[in-house]
């Protein structure tokens, strides 16, 4: 539902001069006199994005802000302010609100972000926590999903897969990494890996009107992906392609300058996993020839 | 819960130079090079802020954006963009999303606002709809709650009370009225009437470190307030003080220039209902002397 709805909504939304980029990327871009404002918004629902009984309200709050800051990182934006909105179950509203706020505050402090507003509501439903995060970039410098060109190299940060074992709740949004890489001027497009490498790479290529050829044996696998593969009936590569919530950066880099791109930065590995190609879709080379890659993983080899 | 939580959260939030105004007003203010960005955020929950079965998804969407634009109006901001976030019940997610979007779009078009982003989630809970709205003002020109001074006149737009009979769903955010009044330079503080005249006026006086003396017989009563009073056991004035969701402007005006303030603008009546005083709290004059006014209405006369 989400994709067709987004496409439909995008097409219906009016174009205003001050909205440089609207629906369809990780964040929107609003032009102001001297800089671009970068805006993103995410809701997390108890039972869907976190299990309150298992993780507790403070970790849910931490995840909420980290997810939003990861979106800002994927645009290479500097965060300014977040807005926290809570729909609290009646039974324990006050305690929940305070604990969620503490979690948000902990991360906000770490990245020097202001909690600048929000609203709280008490209702009879389960917990819903919502955040809007606002950052800034120099005009025209934000990374978007649509800048990839044929021949660009595809890089990912960190290790992928198996986030359900813990990383989906506890991760560092790649703000500092993006800040480190931005001035090099090599990144042509970027997104963060939230839905899964396969889907997120496909989204990036669709936005850039191209395709991608992935070297499956080059994908950096997390320990958690290997661990899950022991019992899941899927390969570790499947987990890396399909699990999602890695919150790592997926970037394309100008092809002719790809060897200038560092293999690590700030201690975080940066791994080339493939190349942007003209044929739309995701592809991988096998002995039998080029094969289309299902974006959700489950690659049986 | 809300007020103590807000106060606590405000005190905990870090002060950044680019956040001119954070938690505690109708919107936050972010400074950019040439103008101030005005940000507000509101969630509406099925069963609390609207009854989906009664009003339908399209009117819920209209209310969502109108509530947010009313917050921008209360800061005299020009809206730029809104961000829509949906937590959709699994049973009819696609239809609901489309209808809500249509409602939002209808109002967005009317006020030339871009729907610039958001997210959609499907879950097992009831419908939650969330919006963040961003507007702009010239630096330093936004109305806030904290600018009222002793001797200022208190004005309200329109007629108050009884919004439950329909106005709480169908109302015009006072953006154009605010735009009309801003250049006169007479308004010292403002908010919109969402919780009820009594509570919203009290909040404004607390932010301005003062009090208010209200002339109860001057409050402009809506037909709906009079209608409800026939059967509710409360007076129409009680309804005007306590019902809330009028989404009219509550403004203070420089005392010595109050007679220059128009009695109507754009066809909307502007009525003086009292004066800002030094003694904190809400007060009204009766034959027996000055009496404290309970902010929630229920004034037995």
Image (cartoon, coloured by chain):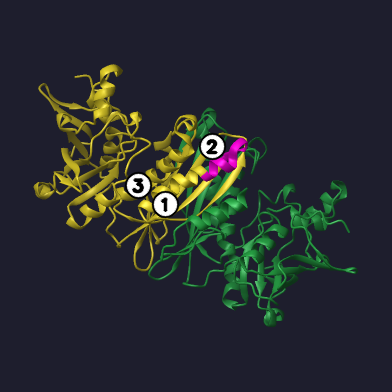
Chain colours: A green, B yellow
- Circles 3, 1 touching at the beta carbon (< 8 Å): yes
- Residue in the image at 19% along x and 31% along y: B283
- Residue in the image at 56% along x and 34% along y: B126
Q: Quadrant of residue A285?
A: bottom right
Q: Position of residue B28 (x, y in %)?
A: 38, 52
Q: Quadrant of residue B252?
A: top left
Residue denoted by label 3: B71
Confirm whether circles 3 and 2 share one chain.
Answer: yes
Residue denoted by label 2: B127
Confirm whether circles 1 and 2 share one chain.
Answer: yes
Q: Position of residue B92 (x, y in %)?
A: 59, 37
Q: CA distance from mark 3 to mark 1?
A: 9 Å
Is A92 rendered above or below residue B23? above
Q: Residues within 10 Å of mark 1 (few under 14, many from 20)?
A: many
Who is closer to the viewer here, A136 or A104? A136
Residue denoted by label 1: B133
Q: Which residues are magenta?
A: B88-98
Q: Earlier in the sequence, mark 3 or mark 1?
A: 3
- Residue in the image at 69% along x and 68% along y: A267
- Circles 3, 2 touching at the beta carbon (< 8 Å): no
Q: CA distance from mark 3 to mark 2?
A: 22 Å
Is residue B294 at all visible to an observer of this figure?
no
> Residue most toward the right?
A287
Mark number displayed over residue A115? none
Q: Position of residue B76 (x, y in %)?
A: 29, 53
Q: Main secondary structure of the magenta part?
A: helix
Q: Earlier in the sequence, mark 1 or mark 2?
A: 2
Q: Earlier in the sequence, mark 3 or mark 2?
A: 3
**Number of the front mark, 1 or 2:** 2
Q: CA distance from mark 1 to mark 2?
A: 20 Å
Who is closer to the viewer here, A43 or A88? A43
């Amino acid at each position: 539902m989400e994709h067709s709805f987004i496409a439909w909504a995008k097409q219906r939304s009016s174009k205003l001069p001050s909205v440089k980029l609207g629906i369809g990327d990780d964040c929107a871009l609003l032009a102001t006199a001297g800089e671009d404002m970068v805006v993103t918004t995410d809701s997390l629902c108890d039972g869907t994005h976190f299990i309150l009984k298992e993780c507790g309200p403070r970790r849910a709050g931490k995840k909420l802000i980290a997810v939003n800051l990861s979106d800002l990182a994927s645009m290479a934006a500097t965060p300014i302010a977040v807005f926290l909105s809570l729909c609290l179950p009646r039974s324990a509203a006050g305690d929940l609100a305070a604990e969620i706020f503490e979690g948000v505050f902990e991360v906000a402090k770490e990245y020097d972000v202001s909690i600048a507003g929000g609203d709280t509501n008490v209702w009879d439903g389960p917990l819903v926590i919502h955040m809007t995060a606002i950052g800034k970039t120099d005009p025209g410098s934000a990374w978007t999903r649509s800048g990839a060109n044929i021949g660009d190299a595809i890089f990912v940060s960190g290790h992928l897969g198996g986030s359900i074992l813990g990383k989906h709740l506890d991760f560092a949004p790649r703000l500092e990494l993006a800040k480190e890489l931005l001035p090099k001027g090599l990144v042509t497009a970027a997104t963060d890996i939230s839905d899964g490498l396969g889907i997120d790479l496909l989204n990036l290529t669709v936005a850039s009107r191209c395709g991608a050829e992935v070297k499956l044996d080059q994908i950096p696998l997390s320990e958690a992906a290997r661990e899950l593969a022991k019992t899941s009936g899927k390969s570790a590569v499947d987990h890396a392609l399909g699990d999602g919530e890695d919150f790592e950066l997926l970037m394309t880099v100008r092809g002719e300058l790809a060897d200038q791109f560092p293999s690590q930065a700030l201690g975080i590995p940066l791994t080339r996993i493939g190349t942007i190609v003209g044929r739309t879709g995701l592809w991988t080379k096998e002995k039998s020839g080029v094969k289309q890659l299902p974006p959700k993983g489950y690659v049986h080899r």
